[in-house]
Amino acid sequence: MLEGLYQSEYWLSTFIIQRGLGFIYLIAFLVAINQFRPLLGKNGLMPVPRFINRIPFKKSPSIFHWHYSDSFFGVIAWTGFFLALLAAFGISDIGPLWFSMLIWSLLWILYLSIVNVGQLFYGYGWESLLLEAGFYSIFISPIQYESSIIIVFIIRWLVFRVEFGAGLIKMRGDKCWRNLTCLNYHHETQPMPNPLSRFFHLLPQNLHKIETFFNHIVQLGAVWLLFLPQPFATIGAILIILSQLYLIISGNYAWLNWLTLLLAISGISDQYLAYMLPVTPPAELQASSVLGFLLIIVGIIVTYLSIDPIKNMISPQQRMNASFNPLHLVNTYGAFGSVTRTRYEIVIEGTTDDKIDTNTTWKAYEFKGKPGDPKRIPMQCAPYHLRLDWQMWFAAMTQIRSNTWLLKFIFKLLENDQKTLGLLSNNPFKDKAPTYIRARLFKYQFSNNKEYKETGNWWNRSFERMYLPPQSIDDLQHFSS
């Protein structure tokens, strides 16, 4: 009875998706290894122990509810990293079916445990997207098995929610999406520009309208093709992939675009993929009745959990990037319903002077990715994610009182805390900790080609206001614990 649910037509597409998910998990755990402890560790900006004392397990299930220490976190993160290596390079497929499912289950549980205590720094849509896709990957057949059409359509349904949800939020949101002018600003004001963002920003306005129109065509139209027979599903998938590639080369959005592109491959049948990737399946593919039965159950669960996301998509009060359950399954997605017209950046500066006056020498801290020095070209960091840099973009649009984590960050800079300084690209006070730190708000704009040739500046910037007046370690002493 279950044999009809298996199709060798999607063996290669699911093979690519599962291997790709392994690599994205690899990046996600590497980000956690490098950044989690200074941001969220025991003495981090938003300590996990405080969070788990307030939030019960059932609202935010995580291994860390049973125990948290920075060393234990390291064990969890490195375990996830090595399991991701096994998954990415197909070692998880060597053993029996249960071995593959165990590897993918552990990856999902470990990353869920991190996300569910990650608070502000893990509150991005691509975290839920990875967890949802990661859960489905548990039920993707290993290479020696035929692929199930159920998992193919579950993944397509996920891609549909990502794209169509984003399209709807744009049409309901900022009017610049409807009059095709949002990309006049967005390349410049996006959270983390990359080396090509300035080039795209300086394109003529008519090309910006074409960019925006193509985005609408894909997100509101082409995505429906995923549910049609071949070759229409392949055409829809290719258009989605092209749009995601465009986003990849024009900005830094962590692994959001890479993962969406990867999942969109579920729409391409093997007869087309074989031209691009000459990988052939084993001569005889197996079919597991146990896995088939589990997939029917997963399909029923996904169908039931889809009720709230569908209601959300058709609602005038559509929410972006919302999870309706603590397991981050069958979420709603969407991004940039509104587009900022002006880019503001917080520049953090310190001094070793004992007295503040007009002659005080201030030195700026540089972040790894976010704009700072006007001459510095933005870096390409995606699919890697610089969590602090992203959060600084949001902080620049709000008042300091809304960002107590930033005050604690400044306190740690006053301490010359090495773990915190590891999140930055430079420390101008290696020999002596600063006595005062201030934060100033600047308006940033891309320089045009003439300005760049004359000054060598990638950005033009102008002072707006003092974001935080000079603070000493005594002023922020209450952030010491």
Image (tube, rainbow, N blue to C red):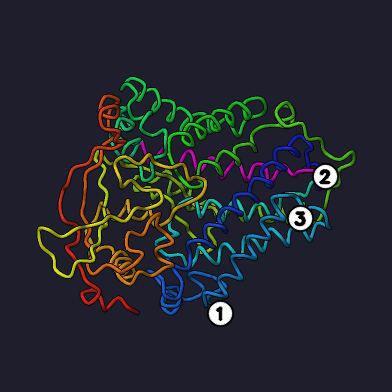
Q: Let me know if residue 20 is in the magenta part.
A: no
* Residue marked by disc 3: 92
- Could you classify mark 2 by the number of other residues whose Cα lies within 10 Å: few (under 14), some (14-19), or many (20 or more)? few
Disc 2 residue type (three-letter): Glu
- The percent coordinates of residue 11 (x first, y second) are 76, 39
Q: Nearer the viewer, mark 3 or mark 2?
A: 3
Kindly identify the residue that appears in the image at 78 percent across and 35 percent down: 279
- The percent coordinates of residue 22 (x first, y second) are 65, 51
Which element is circle 1 on?
A: loop
Quarter of the figure with residue 74: bottom right
Q: Nearer the viewer, mark 1 or mark 2?
A: 1
Quarter of the figure with residue 265: top right
Marks 3 and 2, how far apart at CA: 24 Å
Q: Which mark is residue 66?
A: 1
Disc 3 residue type (three-letter): Ser
Marks 3 and 1, how far apart at CA: 28 Å
* Residue marked by disc 2: 3
The residue nearer to you, when weighing 189 against 289, is 189
- Could you classify mark 1 by the number of other residues whose Cα lies within 10 Å: few (under 14), some (14-19), or many (20 or more)? few
Majority SS type along the magenta span: helix
Disc 1 residue type (three-letter): Trp
Range drawn in magenta: 144-170
